[in-house]
Amino acid sequence: MVDRVLFVCHANLCRSPMAEYLARRLLADRPVTVASAGTDAMDGLAMHPYAAEIAAEGGTDPAAFRSRALRPEYLADATLVLTATRRQRSVCTALAPAALHRTFTLRQFGRLAAAADPQAEPADDSLRAAIAAAARVRGRLQPAAPDADDLRDPIGGTAADFRRCAEEIERSLRPLAALIGATG
């Protein structure tokens, strides 16, 4: 069985595509596939040019990327769902209530993964073990301020705004990659 990470943002043009491409690079040596969708996306649109520029820096061509509207089956098929905001996390869990325990905001999961104990999980399924390790930490960490969980939308901003957003995405993904490596 292939583990899947689904990134979700609003329009699937900026944050979730950047997360998809950054995760693909960071998790390249892991048996994990990544995809993205948007809670309010229109199917078939190209990635925002600034986001595409950042995605291309990882060595892959984002020209074929097309936005996808979020569907319940995407959530059902995902091992882990990472959203840009708390609102999008709520939309995901309303569409697929069974996904509740594997749906987090990206920044939230990054904090949990950084604090998790990978040794507490069996090493047979690294992504699922990473999720379990991070979920166990959830009740032990102090709640974060609401804006600490939301990833600011760079749409309408400058190339530098997109770069800052991508850096925040990567900061949140690095603990996930490390935790998967430690549990698998």
Image (spheres, grey):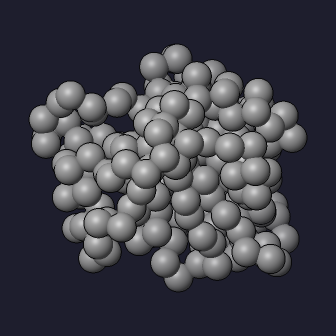
**Residue shown at the point (69%, 52%) measured from the top left:** 74
Horizontally, is 155 left or right of 170 in the view? left
Residue 11's quadrant in the figure?
Answer: top left
**Residue shown at the point (53%, 82%) measured from the top left:** 29
Horizontally, is 110 left or right of 48 in the view? right
- The mark total stands at 0
Quadrant occupied by the C terminus:
bottom right
Residue 56's quadrant in the figure?
Answer: bottom left
Q: Position of residue 46 (x, y in %)?
A: 32, 52
Query: Which is nearer the eye, 124 or 39?
Result: 39
Horizontally, is 30 left or right of 122 in the view? left
Can the viewer see residue 84?
A: no
**Residue shown at the point (55%, 59%) measured from the top left:** 35
The vertical placement of 65 against 136, above or below, is below
Query: Which is nearer the eye, 147 or 153?
Result: 153
Horizontally, is 184 left or right of 162 in the view? right
Query: Which is nearer the eye, 179 or 164?
Result: 164
Can the viewer see residue 69?
A: yes
Q: Position of residue 51 (x, y in %)?
A: 26, 50
Q: Residue furthest bottom?
A: 29
**Residue shown at the point (42%, 32%) measured from the top left:** 151
The vertical placement of 41 against 176, above or below, is above
